[in-house]
Image (cartoon, rainbow, N blue to C red):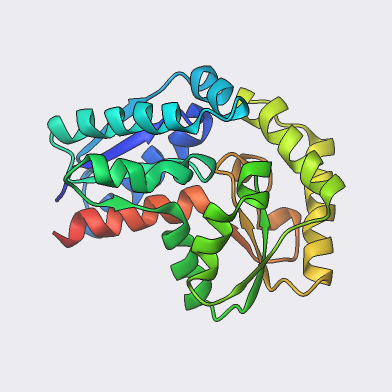
Amino acid sequence: MRAIGLIGGLSWESTVIYYQIINQRVRERLGGSHSADSLIWSVDYTTVEDLIFAGRWDEVSALLADAGRKLEDLGAGVLLVCSNTFSKVSDDVARATGVPVLHIADAVGAEVRSRGMRKVGLLGTRFTMEQRFYRDRLASHGFEVIVPPREQRDLVHDVIFGELVRGVIREASRDAYAEIIDGLAAAGAEGVILGCTEIELLITEKDTTVPLLPTARLHAEAAATFALSG
């Protein structure tokens, strides 16, 4: 089993999902009381949040690349940047280290493709929904990606940074997200990507009739599969 290195704290609320799912999948695969060989480097979220809002992505890249090198030095055989927004620097982490870095958008893209979906909606931070780094990576898997209108994108973004990364779950926000998801379905989306790892703390398929693609869970499952393949 390869040791999995998680660059987490992006935020720690969703890094918990990664740790739980990876260990569950390893136990299911190997049986008994098995769990994953894993390492977590959890950053101070306020530090990186301030950097991205200031547009200082070069400093984010340097910080997460350094975390990746430290995990590699500690024995990690595969790395994950546990975030959709911060996957903007995943390729920088890969260039700075000598082990594979599993990109979250590739894990999601593989799942969309396996379900035969041709058009999907995307929710996430403004960075994820509006910049090309994430949408283009998804589209490279052969399907169309759509996002909500501007006002709804603002709401989704504000709930993430004002509530979810702080561990705040509000029923009103869940209802608002469900309405936005319904709107994406009405626009032709066959499923909706929860393109911020914290969103799956707020809403699940119990709250909507639209198929949802929870990115933290899919990324974690891909990591467990990869770690066991070696």
Relative to residue 189, is residue 101 depicted above or below? Answer: above
Relative to residue 132, is residue 40 depicted above or below? Answer: above
> At 57% across and 21% down in the image, what residue appears?
50
Give the image quarter of residue 3. Answer: top left
Q: Give percent across and percent down for residue 105.
A: 47, 57
Query: Quarter holding the C terminus?
Result: bottom left
Q: Give percent across and percent down for residue 20.
A: 40, 40
Q: Is residue 141 visible?
A: yes
Q: Is residue 67 left or right of residue 34?
A: right
In front here: 90 or 166?
90
Q: Is residue 184 left or right of residue 37?
A: right
Q: Give percent across and percent down for residue 217.
A: 47, 51
Relative to residue 126, is residue 57 depicted above or below? Answer: above
In front here: 204 or 126?
126
Q: How many marks?
A: 0
Relative to residue 97, is residue 103 depicted above or below? Answer: below
> At 69% across and 73% down in the image, what residue appears?
190
Q: Is residue 125 visible?
A: no
Q: Is residue 111 left or right of residue 146?
A: left
Q: Give percent across and percent down for residue 17.
A: 46, 40
> At 48% across and 39% down in the image, what residue appears?
86
In front here: 221 or 137?
137
